[in-house]
Amino acid sequence: MNQYLPYFTLLPLLGMAICAFLPGRSERLIFLTSVVTVGLHILAMLVYGVLWLLGQEAIYFFEGPILYQTHDSHFSIDFFFDRVTAAYGLTASVLTFLVLIFSRYYMHRDRGYKRYFTNVMFFFGGLNLALFAGNFETLFIGWEIVGVTSFFLIAYYRDRYLPVKNALKVVSLYRVADAALLLGIWLCHHSFERNIKFYELLDAHMLFTHFTENPVYVVVISSIFLLVAMVKSAQVPFSSWLPRAMEGPTTSSAIFYGSLSAHIGVFLLLRTFPIWEDSHVFRGIVVFIGLITSLMATMTARVQSTVKTQIAYSSIAQIGLMFVEVAMGWHLLLLFHFIANAFLRSYQLLVSPSVLSYEIHDQFFHFNPPKHPDPKTWWGKIRLTFMVWSIKEWNLDALMFRYLWTPLKTIGRALGFISVRAIVLLITPVFLVGLFLVYNRPQVPSLVQEVLPSAMALLGILLALKAFTERGKAQLNWSLVIMNQLFSALSIGLNEQFDHGQILLFLSGIVVSGAVGFWCMWKLERSGELVTLDRFHGHSFYYPGLAFVFMLASLGLSGFPITPTFIGEDLLLGKIGERQLVLLSFTALSLILDGLVTFRIYARLFLGPNTKGYHEVAFRSS
């Protein structure tokens, strides 16, 4: 039974690959390929689930291919099956099947029909990889795929400004969650001194013995995974991104943010529950976060003027209650709650256009003005106060911008002196000196050896911050991201545990992706197009092939699992000591900023409205 687990992930990815090679005009073939693939997946899940139940619900584990292995590192693709996987996996299959059938006519004759179905199938494959993951590394690969496909489906209407802008907002928080998940995996490596498998977390005696000797690890590891779950499931104060994600087609909103993607944070808490189940204080914190989110989201949903926003906040409120159920240990109730909420929100989103049309028509004939509370009474003032806060969505979006992104932009704007000339005359010589010191460490004083890794990482951070705020030439930003990656590798190389091969593995994807990106920008300039970042250019309108190639280069440069850089990130983090918190913080911030900058470069160059002087402009009405 164990050996069949990888096929639940390979089947959707195979369907995605077939859809990618089909002609764009063959709507029927694209639809049939997608729906047959997901239909076979449902059938396989049902058969496998029945056999699993007959086997008295045993836990299945399969160790897949080993991607990289040394004496102290082991990176393998593992698969795991239990009742959580069964509930999530079957729900995901059925909902995807229903949404695909609905999408056949909803997306009919849409210019991006093939792109939509390919993205949904890629998302389905990544989601299955996360749900069937047997270790944190495999989970992270699926997690990244889910995040990237979310970005592309939010920005599905890529010739419009607002969907692209909101997609960048969502992916900025996704990068925070990705970096936090990597930190959690890094801490688990140091805590257990090996790559931990999910079935090992079910050994209560092993965990009790291990964490009794290292009680600090329980708090730190649990807090990091809780942060990841809060971001991914849109809990307070990260709730504002979910309504912004509704910019994509209604069908993708139904499968992503109404049902499956928004619940993956709860799935992570279920997987890591054995780590923190004995900490009553931490369980109380999870309950508090869930209750506060549920209360605020309920009030916000009741006063919103758009149906998608109402459904989004209603889903957030239910997920908050699921956080409470996880912390209380009511996992069977949670699984039923998840299944019911996922189907309900998908149904509400799919029928929302029809319901909205009916309500607008009905309003003309049976309009009843709302009854406002009396503002003169004490209770009326309280109600109006909460109503205003709810209409403004508790200003969560403004708070995130002010306290998370504004400080980074302020620092970046102060680095205006960094230019191409400064890179050549100042930064490159510093890098070469650092590279010389890597191979001559015995000659460096011990005090300097302790400071150098953090200093090089800080210099890389400054370059990334400059790229984060730069609005000039895209080539400069691209160069700054590559230089930041080089300095990150150099900082690890100057650390105590230097491994030449692992750093080359990390840089191999950076070099290739960087070169491909420069080639794409050169092609655009040669065609007479602008490659500045002062606005959205929408070059994918005329250069869809070049946009696809540059997208792959951006993903490779940001560490997406299509190049060895993805494995190199995990290996480099593993070379940072437990007490090197400064170096760890700089490296994590680099990962966040690199992803944000590369996504922003891609969005500014190839997404958004494409306006030319020779395009037709509608005449104004008389």
Image (tube, grey):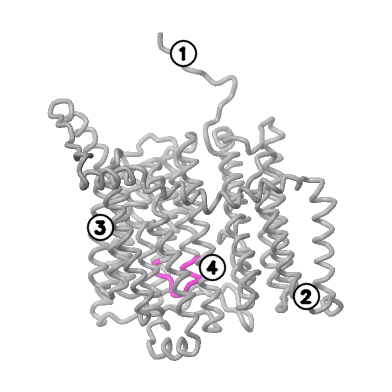
Depth check, front residue: 118 or 444: 444
Q: Residue at x 56, y 37 (%)?
A: 540
Report the Cα–Cα distance between label 3 and label 4: 29 Å
Residue drawn at point x = 39 percent, y = 72 percent: 5
Badge 2 element: helix
Callout 4, which amino acid?
Leu
How many numbered badges does the structure rendering display?
A: 4
Label 1 and label 2: CA atoms lie apart by 68 Å
Q: Which mark is residue 341?
A: 3
| Disc number placed over residue 619 in the picture, else none | 1
Q: Position of residue 603 (x, y in %)?
A: 56, 42
Q: Position of residue 160 (x, y in %)?
A: 47, 34
**For the residue marked with disc 1, what is the amino acid?**
Phe
Q: Nearer the viewer, mark 2 or mark 4?
A: 2
Q: Is residue 514 magenta?
A: no
Neighbor class of circle 1 (other Cα within 10 Å; few <14, some 14-19, many 20+) is few
Question: How much space separates mark 2 and mark 4, taking CA atoms?
Answer: 26 Å
**For marks 1 and 2 on the same chain, the one whose residue lies earlier in the sequence:** 2
Which residue shows up at 68% across the image and 49% down it?
466
Question: Looking at the image, is mark 1 or mark 4 earlier in the sequence?
Answer: 4
Task: Estimate the x, y position of residue 426 in percent, counting from the top left.
Answer: 83, 54
Name which residue type carries label 3: Asn
Badge 4 marks a residue whose secondary structure is helix
Q: Main secondary structure of the magenta part?
A: helix
